[in-house]
Image (cartoon, rainbow, N blue to C red):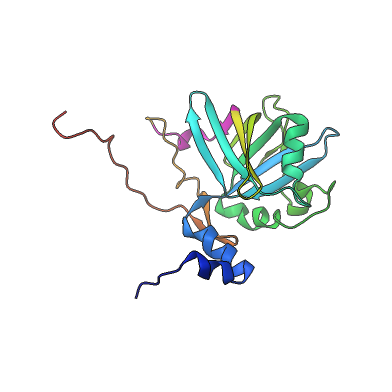
């Protein structure tokens, strides 16, 4: 039996139930660890699920920064240094990655707390997660405030990518399934990317 849920119903729900429902309503999203450091070189690592591709030329990736509060270390570090990394989570590190979502105090390195390894690649000025199989470094280029809910769209340009060679297909597509990349559903559910259907580029019939 189908349910009809109206905005007035959603507004009355308990806050965590409401957050889980709305967050999982758009189904699977990537689990990504964002690595940063502040001007003093102190590391920060946080898991995000609201990461998205904005364009390939130039190569732009965006993410949504929630309202800045006690857990805004990622955003403040990006604004301070201008550089950050995105590291895709795979099944072997998912529990460690999830633990980065705990509210650690400023100055505490989530790399150390989660037992993930910070590494620097190709002279890039922000720490990568060594254990991640697909990772890229970004330079901050723009932010767009979203007044409706006091969030910020943060946009970065890809400067460097590290990926295992056999994960890149002949047409440039990345085989996320072989990398055992993990997706999120809601705030605390994770699942491995499974089989997929690959279809040819669509053209109007007869053309």
Of residues 148 and 152, which is closer to you in this image? 148
From the top left corner, tell me how far across and down residue 21 is, in percent. 53, 64
Name the residue furthest front. 8
Q: Is residue 49 visible?
A: yes
Over which residues does the magenta segment extend? 158-169
Vertical placement of 18 versus 139: above or below? below
Question: Is 127 left, or right, of 153 in this rendering?
Answer: right
From the top left corner, tell me how far across and down residue 113 is, in percent. 78, 53
From the top left corner, tell me how far across and down residue 128 is, in percent. 68, 37
**Quadrant (top left, top right, bottom left, bottom right) of the N terminus:** bottom left
Of residues 19 and 175, which is closer to you in this image? 19
Identified at 40% across, 34% down, the residue is 169
Magenta-drawn stretch contains 165: yes
Identified at 59% across, 28% down, the residue is 157
Identified at 45% across, 37% down, the residue is 174
Identified at 46% across, 46% down, the residue is 178
**Quadrant (top left, top right, bottom left, bottom right) of the C terminus:** top left
């Amino acid at each position: 039996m189908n349910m009809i849920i109206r905005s007035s119903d959603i507004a009355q729900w308990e806050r965590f139930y409401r957050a889980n429902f709305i967050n999982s309503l758009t189904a699977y999203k990537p689990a990504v660890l964002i690595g940063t450091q502040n001007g003093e070189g102190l590391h920060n690592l946080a898991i995000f699920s609201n990461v998205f591709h904005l364009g390939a030329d130039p190569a732009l990736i965006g993410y949504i920064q929630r309202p800045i509060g006690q857990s805004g270390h990622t955003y403040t570090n990006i604004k301070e240094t201008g550089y950050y990394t995105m590291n895709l989570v795979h099944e072997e590190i998912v529990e460690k990655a999830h633990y980065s979502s705990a509210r650690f105090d400023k100055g505490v390195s989530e790399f150390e707390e989660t037992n993930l390894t910070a590494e620097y690649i190709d002279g890039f000025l922000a720490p990568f997660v060594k254990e991640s199989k697909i990772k890229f470094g970004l330079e901050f280029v723009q932010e767009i405030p979203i007044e409706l809910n006091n969030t910020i769209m943060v946009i970065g340009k890809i400067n460097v990518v590290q990926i295992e060679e056999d994960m890149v297909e002949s047409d440039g597509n990345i085989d996320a399934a072989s990398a055992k990349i993990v997706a999120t559903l809601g705030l605390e559910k994770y699942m491995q990317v499974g089989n997929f259907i690959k279809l040819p580029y669509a053209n109007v019939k007869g053309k």
